[in-house]
């Protein structure tokens, strides 16, 4: 009624102003960001040791430029869309910005920066200066693929060069140098996996590890070493994480989540790795 009365008022020109205040995350809107209901998530069915999605970007009801179509006589230059077609351009733009800021980085470094600081939801500003990255190269996938049981023929088709898994030491799928952990634990199980990080921040920095939200669900997590010191840019360091299930209680939910956080108090960096534990 208020709007109707306003429009019927004798004013000669009716105007309105919209001011974008930025995306609200947390606070009064604790549900944001949230993964779209149509998006896949959680451990991969084909490879449960890999947690998906790697990273998410804005992809629901996105207003963007829209090309004219001769097929249906579309002339409106804007449209509202949802799905990968809107999320992918956001992430591609973030990758382009990172590459322009770090022209010496290869695609693996760029990808690692986006994954490592987003911990699920992309954070473009932090990805420009992530501190640490979980570097991974194409050759690292060969032991992973062989460990999944693919034949030499299939692995050769995937990597586009001759591969003999008999000459490769296969690794467990959760051993791939991803910035996340997807662990399956039965009663009394203990599993250890390693990760390697690369320092792309200040030459001299010290990171300390903290694990969140898993002890309360009966999972003990040990990180060795729990402190990593760097003296050079591009210096690499490895650490091992041991997950131990402390009970055999049947839970109402089969999955619990937590995180491993590497923080550098001396230079202000925080790198988060999401952890998903599936109870068997």
Image (cartoon, helix red, strand yellow):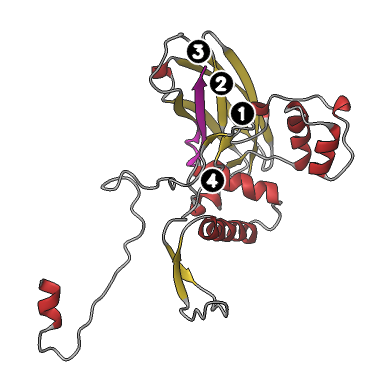
What is the secondary structure assignment of the residue under circle 4?
loop
Q: Are the two marked residues, 4 and 1, in contact with CB atoms closer than 8 angstroms?
A: no
The residue tagged 4 is 55
Task: Give the percent coordinates (x, y) of residue 76.
Answer: 46, 79
Specify the label residue 184 is tagged with: 2
Alpha carbon distance from label 4 to label 1 = 16 Å
Judge from the rendering whether residue 242 lies leftward or rightward of residue 20; answer left or right. right
Query: What range is drawn magenta here?
Result: 260-280
For disc 3, the marked residue is: 245
Vertical placement of residue 38 versus 151, above or below: below
Q: Is residue 28 left or right of residue 238?
A: left
Q: CA distance from mark 3 to mark 2?
A: 10 Å
Quick one: label 4, few (<14), some, or many (20+) residues within 10 Å? some
Q: CA distance from mark 1 to mark 2?
A: 8 Å
Residue visible at 39% across and 47% down in the picture: 33
Depth check, mark 3 against mark 2: the one in front is 2
- Count of all numbered marks drawn on residues in the image: 4
Question: Where does the image place residue 141, in percent across and percent down from the top left?
Answer: 74, 36
Residue pointed to by mark 1: 49
The kind of secondary structure element at disc 2 is strand
- 66 in relation to 256, above or below: below
Would you call the spot at circle 3 few (<14 residues within 10 Å), some (14-19), or many (20 or more)? many
Q: Nearer the viewer, residue 236 or 73?
A: 73
Spatial CA distance of label 1 from label 3 is 17 Å
Q: Which quadrant is the N terminus positioned in?
A: bottom left
Question: If you read the primary sequence from the N terminus, does the residue marked by circle 1 or circle 3 appear first?
Answer: 1
Give the x, y percent position of residue 270.
49, 39
Instruction: Identify which residue, 230 or 252, lies in the foreground.
Output: 252
């Amino acid at each position: 009624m208020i709007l109707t009365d306003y429009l019927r008022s004798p004013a000669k020109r009716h105007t309105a102003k919209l001011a974008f205040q930025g995306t609200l995350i947390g606070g009064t809107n604790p549900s944001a960001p949230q993964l779209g209901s149509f998006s896949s998530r959680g451990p991969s069915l084909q490879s449960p040791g890999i947690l998906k999605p790697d990273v998410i970007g804005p992809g629901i009801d996105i207003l963007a430029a829209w090309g004219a179509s001769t097929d249906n006589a579309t002339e409106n230059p804007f449209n509202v869309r949802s799905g990968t077609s809107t999320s992918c351009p956001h992430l591609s733009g973030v990758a382009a910005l990172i590459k322009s800021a770090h022209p010496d980085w290869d695609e693996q470094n760029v990808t690692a920066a986006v994954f490592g600081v987003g911990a699920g939801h992309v954070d473009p500003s932090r990805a420009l200066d992530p501190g640490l990255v979980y570097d991974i190269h194409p050759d690292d996938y060969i032991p992973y693929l062989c460990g999944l049981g693919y034949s030499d023929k299939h692995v050769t088709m995937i990597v586009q060069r001759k591969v003999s898994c008999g000459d490769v030491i296969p690794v467990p799928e959760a051993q791939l140098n991803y910035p996340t952990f997807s662990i399956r634990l039965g009663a009394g199980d203990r599993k250890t996996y390693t990760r390697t990080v690369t320092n792309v921040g200040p030459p001299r920095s010290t990171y300390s590890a903290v694990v969140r939200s898993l002890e309360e669900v009966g999972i003990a997590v040990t990180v060795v070493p729990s402190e990593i010191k760097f003296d050079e840019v591009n210096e690499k360091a490895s650490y091992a994480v041991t997950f131990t299930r402390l009970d055999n209680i049947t839970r109402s939910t089969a999955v619990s989540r937590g995180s491993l956080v590497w923080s550098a108090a001396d230079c202000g960096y925080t790198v988060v790795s999401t952890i998903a534990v599936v109870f068997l």
